[in-house]
Image (cartoon, rainbow, N blue to C red):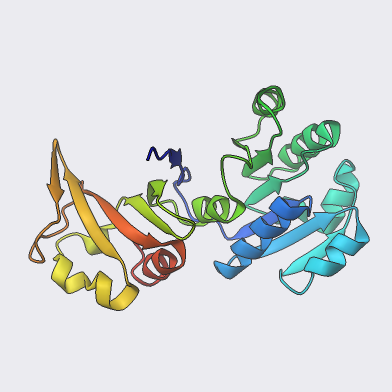
Amino acid sequence: MKSLFYKIGLLKERFNQFTVIGLGRFGSTVAIALERLGCSVLAIDDDEQKVEELKDYVSFAKVADATNINALRDAGVQNSDVAIIAIASDIQSSVLATLLVKELGVKYVVAKAVNDAHGKILEKIGADLVVFPEKESAELLAQKLVVPNIIDFMELSANVKIFEVKPNPNLIGKTLDELQLRRKYNLSILAIHRGGDIIINPHPDEKIEENDIIYIIGTLENLNKLLLIENI
């Protein structure tokens, strides 16, 4: 069976304040996932019903016209580290909203695209990351934005994945036995990539070194527990 690797973990710093504009299925899922990861989320849509349905799941939910810079400013979009433009069906609104949040000074802008042409336009006008929902799930986008240590993942099933992770300095020098990943988090290290070598099924006494890349199998939920607690 052929599996695909998708690039995740593009950010080099931790962001905590997010705006999600467009509360369809993708946008709503991203917003809820970010809140569950401990972030503060401002959710915006011009549809009052969508805002009402989401308000109990995010920090702030407001009805606003994403193509009006004054409405976005009044909503507080300029205070966000990251804005996610999840409007895709209306390409004109998607493009304009992307331009406006950039103008408001948001540090990092993610924009959802429906096709390659739409994606190229978004890139040209300044979107820092363009995502295609059919290739990337909303929950994994949230993971990418919050925890940058994950480099790639390979999906084995709906729940189980192999993650390629760069460890933080606080793990350097610890043995696999000391980490106790299986007991604490139901995760297993399959391999360690060290220089030009791959250590398969590493011994419990194997220590994590500074430039290692580790391959962990498990669920995203359990990996989140590890990433947040051990600060990997």
Image quadrant in which you'd find residue 118: top right
Residue at 90% of width from left, 43% of height from top?
68
Residue at 37% of width from left, 40% of height from top?
1
Q: Residue furthest bottom?
A: 183
Question: Front-most of 146 and 177?
Answer: 177
Question: Front-most of 5 and 96?
Answer: 5
Residue at 63% of width from left, 50% of height from top?
82
Q: Is residue 99 above or below residue 174?
A: above
Q: Position of residue 91 (x, y in %)?
A: 81, 32
Q: Position of residue 54 (x, y in %)?
A: 78, 67
Image quadrant in which you'd find residue 4: top left
Q: Is residue 163 above or below residue 51?
A: above
Residue at 48% of width from left, 45% of height from top?
11
Labels in figure, total: 0
Does 35 sit left or right of 97 as displayed? Answer: left
Does 202 sit left or right of 67 as displayed? Answer: left
Q: Residue furthest front?
A: 1
Does 128 sit left or right of 74 as displayed? Answer: left
The C terminus - image quarter? bottom left
Question: Front-most of 14 and 205?
Answer: 205
Image quadrant in which you'd find residue 114: top right
Q: Position of residue 17 (x, y in %)?
A: 63, 59
Question: Front-most of 61 and 222?
Answer: 222
Q: Position of residue 166 (x, y in %)?
A: 30, 50
